Amino acid sequence: MDTEHPSKRWFASDNNASVHPAIMEALDRANHGHAIAYGDDVITARVLGLFSETFGAQSETFLVWNGTGANVMAIAAATRPWEGVVCTDLAHIDVDETGAAEHIAGVKLFTVPGTDGKLTPDAIRDRVSGLGRVHSNLPRLVSISQPTETGLVYGIEELAALGELCRERGLHLHVDGARLANAAVSLGVGLREAAGPADVLSFGGTKNGLMFGEAVVFLNPALAQGAGHLRKNVLQLDCKMRYLAAQYEAYLADGLWRANAAHANDIARRLGEAAAGRLGLRLAYARHANIVFAELPPGAIDAALENWFFYVDRATSVARWVCSWDNTAEDVSAFADDLAAALGRA
Amino acid sequence: MDTEHPSKRWFASDNNASVHPAIMEALDRANHGHAIAYGDDVITARVLGLFSETFGAQSETFLVWNGTGANVMAIAAATRPWEGVVCTDLAHIDVDETGAAEHIAGVKLFTVPGTDGKLTPDAIRDRVSGLGRVHSNLPRLVSISQPTETGLVYGIEELAALGELCRERGLHLHVDGARLANAAVSLGVGLREAAGPADVLSFGGTKNGLMFGEAVVFLNPALAQGAGHLRKNVLQLDCKMRYLAAQYEAYLADGLWRANAAHANDIARRLGEAAAGRLGLRLAYARHANIVFAELPPGAIDAALENWFFYVDRATSVARWVCSWDNTAEDVSAFADDLAAALGRA
Amino acid sequence: MDTEHPSKRWFASDNNASVHPAIMEALDRANHGHAIAYGDDVITARVLGLFSETFGAQSETFLVWNGTGANVMAIAAATRPWEGVVCTDLAHIDVDETGAAEHIAGVKLFTVPGTDGKLTPDAIRDRVSGLGRVHSNLPRLVSISQPTETGLVYGIEELAALGELCRERGLHLHVDGARLANAAVSLGVGLREAAGPADVLSFGGTKNGLMFGEAVVFLNPALAQGAGHLRKNVLQLDCKMRYLAAQYEAYLADGLWRANAAHANDIARRLGEAAAGRLGLRLAYARHANIVFAELPPGAIDAALENWFFYVDRATSVARWVCSWDNTAEDVSAFADDLAAALGRA
Amino acid sequence: MDTEHPSKRWFASDNNASVHPAIMEALDRANHGHAIAYGDDVITARVLGLFSETFGAQSETFLVWNGTGANVMAIAAATRPWEGVVCTDLAHIDVDETGAAEHIAGVKLFTVPGTDGKLTPDAIRDRVSGLGRVHSNLPRLVSISQPTETGLVYGIEELAALGELCRERGLHLHVDGARLANAAVSLGVGLREAAGPADVLSFGGTKNGLMFGEAVVFLNPALAQGAGHLRKNVLQLDCKMRYLAAQYEAYLADGLWRANAAHANDIARRLGEAAAGRLGLRLAYARHANIVFAELPPGAIDAALENWFFYVDRATSVARWVCSWDNTAEDVSAFADDLAAALGRA
């Protein structure tokens, strides 16, 4: 498709979306005079206050550049190099971060085959059983994505059960919350609740209307020891921090996170309904948040891609469609029309 | 001082400065519709073309988050973990990056005591002499800052002499060009010339009017092998890359880098002249670019800091004043007036 | 069982065995007067000559402390931290080295589920397919164990096919040859042939009669660049090297490697025949070298362990019996008798 | 000189010396039957008991391969990658370990220029002053060598003062005791006292009559958490551990450490007296333990090296002579005679 037209939108990923106007305004507002660098400015002070309100007074938050940076910093804080992290074999930290956790935190990832991308207490228990020997890494951290890479949202009870297992086994819990806002909206809860009993959270905004920047939130402050130094050491300290902080201030202050995520989830609901209904496609996973996975007839894939850019697994013919804060109901209609044509159902 | 007033400016650092309006406009212009993530967008394609024009067709450029990220990526690309980097003991990579080079690239830094922050061929030769044994790291890279942390600019012939030494000893040359624009203006040359015979360059914009983002420019493309993977591995891949690229497009396209640096250097010239002239202060280093180092009477330091925020080494009473694209001649006058009062010369 | 009696032998592992008398004599012979440390002694010079004779004039060999050290040094030499290593999910480097490859070489291991512990060109091709993106490590090395952790030996043609696949895909081949001597004897070839088209080999002796020490043999000398420094950097440089070298001189000079391995393989043949014949046990893998895997009736395991120490996977009831240079036919008979009793077949 | 004659001895280094007969006998005694690998054998159990007797019931000891391995394991246990280690610029960990601490523990070394190789509380205080910022590593560990690389021994009160400073600043203390026995003999105290208030000790034997192997002794057991896994992760776990353990059993059980060190120190006393007396040489450092540093007339160096192998710093004409357990009074006489001839004083 023509991905070069400056006002075109599609469903390839929420990091393909534009920046929300309220964020652009916040950047403009921040852009006056000088501000002390590296986070010693008033906007950063305000936004850290908002994080405390959101995640609890005991929490400690560190703004960082990006999601991979947030995940690696969280893992490096919570582990030593001879320890291990249990995650699914679909986890972003395993398949989409070019070995950053291994190289920089030094750890091993203990992957669990995930049919639908969720970890369960039983799967964790099985994976770590027998791992106490000095010849293998010592499991220390469980890492889940909320929502998962398959678009599913862990329920409050599922989170509690994972927390219980972690306590029982002396493991910490990391939540990769690159899309935590979408999970919270899906569950109808706040951000804190959506993170469950996490000890440390990678909290994202880039996929939900920000320009750049994520946050590492230590809900268990014992893990935050030295984290200020760690952030710099892992290349995640923004010098002109006020511009990163200003975005999160706008994101958290007036519920922008919720409004954007609610919109994206609603667009995904519409797209999922069109796919399963009018288009007669099988959804590969339930639609919980802002992602729809649909199985396409192999012969229709090329035609579907002609006018739209998205990712499709040629081996399984499953397409992934991610909805963004800036997608519209009209985008869904236009896409569904073109898909119908590609499927010969126009 | 009151650093919280939103329109106040000072001389603490060029990373305290605001973002240039042309950069804000470029961000606005980029903010329409969707764009493929991770650099596969049209703005990134255009800006990489501008980098090729600027640094030569054989060069390869990778946009990254920040200066420390650029330095570590450059070092990791050019070295193996049992190798070493020669730099001064004032080098940013040694004293201001929380051991990121050691932790992430694995290397050892071989520091040379620098009286004025410059490396010389003789100093390098002395430092690496006798380092061939397997019991110490193998020197592989020389890293200089252009301008230096002391604000001095390497002349074209000094750069050539360093390049000659590197060739002779089989060493690569890295230039930390966080303020390369200021050096180029000082030398009256282009960016390519100001980098001298560098094999790899950390090219900065954040200190000269950008919001965020730096570039690793491989002038020796042999070092760029695998650099795309390395960038992600060291947490430096911006997903919504168009916003980083748009800033560099505005920075390189119409000479914004030169205009901003020329202005900052000129403000520093005024400030240096006021310091050495009217205020009668000794300058600790010659003023080449946008930084002035002045020796204050110890008894006047606290008074000087009352209305202005800047860094001063209490052991030597040397203050560092950095001038930014947004400082004005009026800022200089106001600062000089207050300094005069603090010095009892009002 | 009583594992404390000083003259008792069992079948738990070949690293439980004693040191061969010829090795003890070599250590004694080396123990006169002073010798330059770190390998600049005459015994080391002689043994490196033997390695050149054995593995070819172009090869370069570095003696190291242990098998994990050899594997990590080989991997670190052949890869960069953003690259990956393809191996089976039974590979010693994955399951028995406490994440040393990840922590020290920085790489990711791409595991392939192995039913019998062997890698095939097809399995490698499948695993690396689609791994070119910058979001995942770049496959660079294939690592196999010869013999495998399941005791199977790759045939000459299997090795050639793996080499062909590696050449085709630009991958290097590492062979973990902790028991290479046993594989060579099994194949009826020399050590060089048993390593197949390896670029780099971990060559072991500790499991075949030595006291300590392994060797990293770079058959592709391009990978040996900087290896002397790397060895020290990864903690593998023995200062009193003559005692390590003397062992390998005795091991390589008069065919001790072959005699010991032939004996151990023969003992394993006897044990395998007793297990499958008289005891009626199913062998979990074919017996190629010096290891026998036998399926025990779950109810007989505890009785079998009463007088003998060995490892058994309680989930599958498969026992692993490893035969050493110092095991005897009488050991086999005694063990078989006790097993028969445990199985109720006495 | 001819370093190839198998019964020749010299004064180049105590790691050039042979293995003490009692150690060879211990290896022979250990060489019967099978023993469980990786330290689960009876000899290792016994030797760990001896370490507890020697260093206190609360201490935890891990046998490792070599001195660099011991140092890196100690540092990795006591620090995180964003932390730093204060040491002199003569420290073995800084100048003789090919960057292993930086690469594997990830830390930065904060070196203090040492005129005589000793660290003092004042020097440490100066070095860490102002290092709290997130832009530089956080000092966590002080590392001293006992005796120093210059052959000096820290007195009991000097050690206490260092311990006091560490407590005051929240730093841990590491003692590199590759030659701790020589220091203990010099001080007339036991090994525990010679290590002073160390939190973690690298305890050597290889330079004092062993074949291989060192020990990491955690006197502060809080630092030993996970150390069993760490040992394997940093490639320091000996599989046939009984042979390493047997050496330390012989070394600790009957005072062999003391006898060997006392002998070596006495030989050094004789050599120092001959150098300063009959030969009229200036000693560059006081002779405390088993090392003598003497300033040679530059013109006599080549003649002195003709019949004897030793290291000499050509820039300062200072020669280092290390005495071993196997050097004799006759060695001293012969060496002094040849030196006298080289000096034209025969």
Image (spheres, coloured by chain):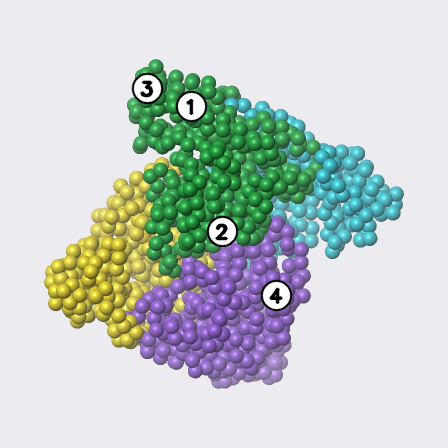
Chain colours: A purple, B yellow, C cyan, D green
Give the number of the disc on residue D343: 3
Please name the residue that numbered disc 2 is placed on. D78
Q: Secondary structure at mark 2?
A: helix
Please name the residue that numbered disc 4 is placed on. A167
On the same chain, marks 4 and 2? The answer is: no
The three-letter code of the residue at mark 2 reads: Ala
Give the number of the disc on residue D270: 1
Q: Secondary structure at mark 4?
A: helix
Chain hosting mark 3: D
Q: Nearer the viewer, residue D44 or C295?
A: D44
Q: Nearer the viewer, residue B101 or D292?
A: D292
Q: CA distance from mark 1 to mark 4?
A: 64 Å
Chain hosting mark 1: D
Query: In which quadrant will I find the C terminus of chain C?
Result: top right
Q: CA distance from mark 2 to mark 1?
A: 40 Å
Q: Earlier in the sequence, mark 2 or mark 1?
A: 2
Q: Residue at x 57, y 71 (%)?
A: A197
The answer to whether A315 is drawn above or below residue D147 in the figure is below
Chain hosting mark 2: D
> How far across and down, in percent of the image, does residue C337 sit?
84, 40
Residue A166: quarter of image:
bottom right
> How far across and down, in percent of the image, does residue A127 sit?
65, 60
On the same chain, marks 2 and 3? The answer is: yes
Question: Is residue B35 rendered to the left or right of residue D190?
Answer: left
Residue count near mark 2 (Cα–Cα under 10 Å), binned few <14, some 14–19, many ≥20: many
Question: Is residue B43 rendered to the left or right of residue A126?
Answer: left
Residue count near mark 1 (Cα–Cα under 10 Å), binned few <14, some 14–19, many ≥20: some
Q: Is residue A99 visible?
A: no
Q: How many marks?
A: 4
Q: Earlier in the sequence, mark 3 or mark 1?
A: 1
